[in-house]
Image (cartoon, rainbow, N blue to C red):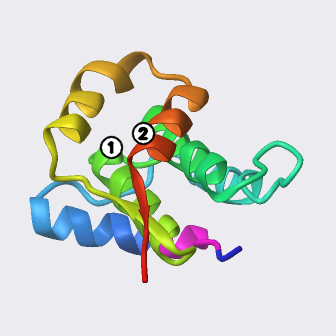
């Protein structure tokens, strides 16, 4: 399994901020560091979709950045899936509806189910 480092997630976040015009900065670096170690726990997160869901949840819900946490969660999760042989389409009505209506009250298990149902293998 390939993982992103906290520094790589921060880089992803900075690129998003530059592109979407927001405020750079980390509001809680400890959350980001713990999250990136936590998803490596194979007893809790047994496969890449479970790890991806925890990554998505951790960034979008625990909000380690000042701004654009959901955008960072989407991008970092898709990159994580990509470096592990899969991904998910983010430019679909299904995805937009999930982010808008389901994510605000979603648990890790809900995110994992969504990723599993909407991911694809990459060549």
Q: Which residues are magenta?
A: 3-9
Mark 2 neighbour class, 10 Å CA radius: few under 14, some 14 to 19, many 20 or more:
many
| Rendered location of residue 122, percent (x, y) | 42, 76
> How many numbered callouts?
2
The quadrant where residue 103 appears:
top left
Going 71% across and 73% down the picture, which residue do you hit?
A: 1
Relative placement, left or right, of 53 versus 98 is right
As drawn, is 11 to the left or to the right of 18?
A: right
The residue at 78%/50% (across/down) is 46
Q: Is residue 10 above or below residue 39?
A: below
Q: Residue at x 82, y 42 (%)?
A: 44
What x and y, as percent, mark residue 9?
A: 47, 67
Q: Are marks 1 and 2 in contact (CB under 8 Å)?
A: yes
Whether the magenta-drawn stretch holds residue 110 is answered as no
Question: Does 89 appear above or below 99?
Answer: below
- Residue drawn at x 28%, y 60% is 24
State how far apart marks 1 and 2 are (Cα). 5 Å
Say what secondary structure mark 1 lies in.
Answer: helix
- Which residue is the extreme one toward the top? 105
Residue at image mark 1: 70
Q: Nearer the viewer, residue 2 or 37?
A: 2
Percent coordinates x, y for residue 82 in the rendering:
46, 73
Q: Is residue 4 magenta?
A: yes
User: Residue 107 placed where, x, y %?
Assistant: 55, 23
Q: Nearer the viewer, residue 2 or 47?
A: 47
Query: Residue 51 vs residue 27: left or right?
Result: right
Residue under numbered circle 2: 60
Quarter in which the C terminus is drawn: bottom left
Q: Residues within 10 Å of mark 1 (few under 14, many from 20)?
A: some
Q: Is residue 98 shown above or below 22?
A: above
Can you name the residue that lies furthest to the right here? 43
- The reply, left or right, for residue 111 in relation to residue 16 is right
């Amino acid at each position: 399994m390939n993982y992103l480092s906290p520094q790589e997630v921060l880089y992803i976040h900075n690129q998003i901020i530059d592109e979407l015009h927001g405020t750079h900065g980390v509001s809680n670096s400890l959350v980001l560091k713990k999250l990136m170690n936590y998803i490596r726990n194979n007893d809790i997160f047994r496969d890449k979709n479970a790890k991806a869901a925890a990554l998505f949840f951790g960034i979008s819900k625990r909000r380690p950045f000042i701004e654009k946490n959901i955008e960072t969660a989407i991008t970092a999760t898709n990159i994580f899936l990509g470096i592990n042989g899969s991904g998910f389409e983010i430019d679909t009505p299904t995805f937009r509806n999930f982010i808008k209506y389901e994510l605000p009250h979603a648990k890790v298990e809900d995110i994992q189910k969504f990723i599993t149902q909407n991911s694809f293998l990459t060549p």
